[in-house]
Amino acid sequence: LLAVACGGDDDGRPMDMGTDAGAVTPGTDAGSVTPGYMVSGLLTGLTVSIPSTYAVLVVVTGSLLLPLYAMMTIALVVCNVLGFAHAFFGWQLGHSEAIAATICLGFAVDYCVHLCHGYLHSPQPNRRAKAADALATMGVTVTAGALTTAGSAGIMAGCQALVFSKMGVLIVFTTLNSLVYSLGFFAPLVLLA
């Protein structure tokens, strides 16, 4: 159904823009074989960005636990989305997936950071009240942001160019996973912080 919605060829697969300049190759994915540099580049990017994100969150929050919980949530989101893309769609790590994985990390951070901010700036006296206040003040904002992002990425998933189609699908799944994990995993963990 998704392949047909993406403006696919006769066999239901989206048209790829091809690897040659100006070539359009129906029903092929130039990134179906994962080159070693793609895997090492993605791992290098994650190796740099994850500790950097943790360090920034430690400095900003002044806590060691809240950033740890945020990083656990982010790791779950990224692993879930990339695992789903591989298991459900059969996508290998190619150019579009490597770019989308980096974007995936950025979207996964967003909602946790908003809830962290709401928790830290809550005037409430204890953890439970701070968590409830963070969900009351930032939960609506996070949910609205997730719905608008998923909606716009859902439109992008309908593109005929495979790279944009895949990116749209991955952004939709990242956004929805990030929303679920932020509200259903991260928010209960802040009660322990």
Image (cartoon, rainbow, N blue to C red):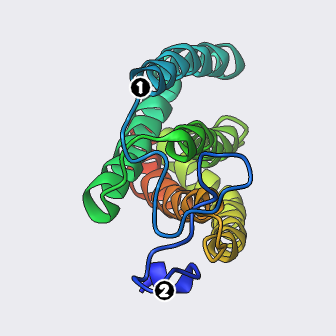
Q: Are marks 2 and 1 in contact (CB under 8 Å)?
A: no
- 52 or 186, which lies in front? 52
Residue 157, image quadrant: bottom right
- 174 or 19, which lies in front? 19
Q: Position of residue 9 (x, y in %)?
A: 50, 81
Three-letter code, disc 1 = Val
Horizontal side of residue 133 vs 4, given as left or right: right
Q: Position of residue 60 (x, y in %)?
A: 71, 20
Horizontal side of residue 45 vs 34, given as left or right: right
* Residue at x 72%, y 71% (from the top left corner): 152
Q: How many marks?
A: 2
Mark 1: which secondary structure?
helix
Q: Position of residue 48 (x, y in %)?
A: 56, 14
* Residue at x 47%, y 38% (from the top left corner): 74
Mark 2: which secondary structure?
helix
- 169 or 187, which lies in front? 169
Q: Which mark is residue 39?
A: 1
Three-letter code, disc 2 = Val
- Label located before the other in sequence (2 or 1): 2
* Residue at x 67%, y 73% (from the top left corner): 159
Residue extending farthest to the left is 87
Q: CA distance from mark 2 to mark 1?
A: 29 Å
Residue 140, image quadrant: bottom right
Q: Is residue 193 visible?
A: no
Q: Which mark is residue 4?
A: 2
Against 191, is 170 above or below?
below
